[in-house]
Image (tube, grey):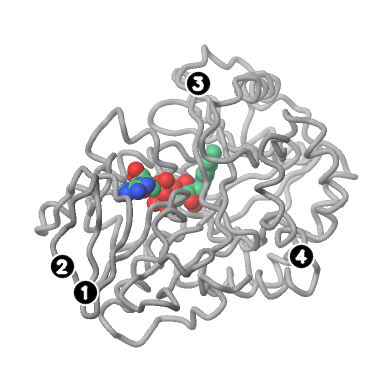
Amino acid sequence: MFDPNPPLEDIDYRGACSFGNACSIAYGAVTPVAMPGILKDVPSMLANPLAHLSIQWRNFPELIPWLLNFIRSSKSDRVLEIVNELTELMRLAEAGISPLLQESGSQNLIRNRECLYLYKSEEKFQQAQYGLQLRANQGVRIETLDATQIHEREPHLTPVYHKGVLFLDAYSLESPYVYMKNLANCILQRGGKFVHQHIDEIVTGNDHVQLRSQGLLSEHADQVVVAAGAWSKKLLHPHDQVLLNTERGYHVMFPESEKLLTTPTCYPEHGFYMTPMMDGIRSAGTVELGGLGAAPNLKRIEVIEKVTRQLIQGLGPSGDTWLGHRPSMPDSLPVIGQSPHNERIIYAFGHGHLGLTLAGITGRLVAEITGGYTLSKNINALRPHRF
Ligand SMILES: Cc1cc2nc3c(=O)[nH]c(=O)nc-3n(C[C@H](O)[C@H](O)[C@H](O)COP(=O)(O)OP(=O)(O)OC[C@H]3O[C@@H](n4cnc5c(N)ncnc54)[C@H](O)[C@@H]3O)c2cc1C
C-alpha cells in the first residue's frame, strides 16, 4: 500500500477522512444527500457559509459540473434508483465489515447499538417523513420516540426535541482511528507492506502498471487499486473523467463528556452527529463544498461547539478539532470498478458520508474484481463514467 500518511503514523494520518469521522456504521443510511427539493436550498447554501450545507464562493466555478449533477440526482425517480442501489450495498455491508472487525481484533470497539435522530417540532418531523418512508420501504427498522421516551433514554439532552426516531440497524465504534490502526497491523502481520510515498501518476504498459513517485518508477505490477479518497482524481487514467469532489466536514471533541450520552444522536437540521466514543463525545459532520486546498473555516467549528453546548447539558471543555475531506460523488454512490481505458486500474473511492460503513463490502468487491471472481453484486451503477 502506497500512502504518504499510512494509518500507523499517528500525527500525519489526521489528513485522511477515515481519521475523524462520526464513528457510525449506519446500515439504514440508504438515502442520498441530494433529495428532492435540494435545488431551492442552493441560494442559501451560497449565501450562508456557516449553514450546515454550504458552498464556498471561491470554489463555485470549479464546482458547477458536480453541482448540476448533484441537482439532477435529486429528482425523485433518480433518488429511488439510488436508494435501491444503496440498499443493495447495505445488505452486503455487514458481511463485508464483520471479518474486518474480527480478524483485526476490533470487535471490542463496537460501542453503541442504534442511532437517534431528533426533531424540534412536528413540522420538522413531518418534513423528515419522505426520507424516513423511503428507508422504511427498504426494510430499514425505525422506531418513533416521543419526548418522554427520549428524556428517559438520554436525560442529559436539553429538551428542545419534540420527537425522535431510533434507527435499530446501526452501531458506532469507540474510535475509527484505532480501528484503522488495527486493520493496518493486521495487514502487516499477513505480509502486506506500507510504503510511505505520495504517488504522482499511474504509468501503464502493455502487460503491467507502474507507479511514479518523485520521478521514480515502482516495480511492475499486474493491477493497481486507486483508493486515495478525495484525492483519487489525481490518480485517474489520463482518459478517464470522474465527477469526484469533496464535501468538507468537521469535528469537535468534548473529551470528558462521553458519559452524558449513550446513543449517537443527530438533529438533521444541524447536520452533525454527537457520538459518545473512547475519547469523549465527538460532534462530527456538516457539509461544506469547499475543495481540497483551503484552510479550515474556524467559524464552522465554533458553530458546531456552540450548538452542541445548547443540545447537551453539562458538557465539559472542548478539545481536538478537525477538518476532513469526504470523497463525494454527486449521486452519493461510490465508484467501484475498472477504468474503462485500462482494466488493470481498479477504482474504489467516492464513498462520501458512508466510507466507514461501506469499506468492507468495497474491499470484497475489489478483491473479486482483481481475482477475477464472480461479483457479490452488479456494479454497473457504480461505474466511474456514469455521468
Ligand atoms: C465529519 C465526517 C463524519 C463522517 N462520519 C461517517 C460515519 O459516521 N460513518 C461512515 O460510514 N462514514 C462517515 N464519514 C465518511 C468517511 O469518513 C469517508 O467516506 C471515508 O473515511 C473515506 O475513506 P477513504 O479511505 O476513501 O479516504 P481517506 O480516509 O481520506 O484516505 C485516503 C488516503 O489516500 C491517501 N492519498 C491521497 N493522495 C495520495 C497519493 N497521491 N498517493 C498515495 N496516497 C494518497 C491519503 O494520505 C489517505 O491516507 C464521515 C466523514 C466526515 C468528514
| SS label for mark 4 | helix
State yes or no: discs 4 and 3 in contact (Cβ < 8 Å): no
Say which residue label 1 marks: 208
Which numbered disc covers residue 72?
4
Q: What residue type is labelled 3?
A: Phe
Q: Give the residue drawn at x 28%, y 70%.
A: 204
Q: Percent from the top left, x then y, of residue 307?
A: 69, 23
Which of the two discs, 1 and 3, labels the residue nearer the N terminus? 1
Closer to the chain start, of discs 4 and 2, is 4
Which residue is disc 2 drawn over?
220
Query: Please, what secondary structure does the residue beneath circle 1 have?
Result: loop
- Cα–Cα span, label 3 and label 2: 47 Å
The disc, 1 or 2, on the residue closer to the chain's N-terminal end is: 1
Residue 336 to residue 154: above or below:
below
Out of 65 and 206, give the one closest to the viewer. Answer: 206
State left or right for residue 5 relative to residue 252.
Answer: left
Question: Distance from label 4 to label 1 (Cα)?
Answer: 38 Å
Q: How crowded is mark 4: few (under 14 residues within 10 Å), some or many (20 or more)?
A: some
Alpha-carbon span between mark 4 and mark 2: 41 Å
In the picture, residue 130 is in which quadrant? bottom right
Label ID, residue 254? 3
Above or below — where is 292 with respect to 387?
above
Cβ atoms at labels 1 and 3 below 8 Å apart: no
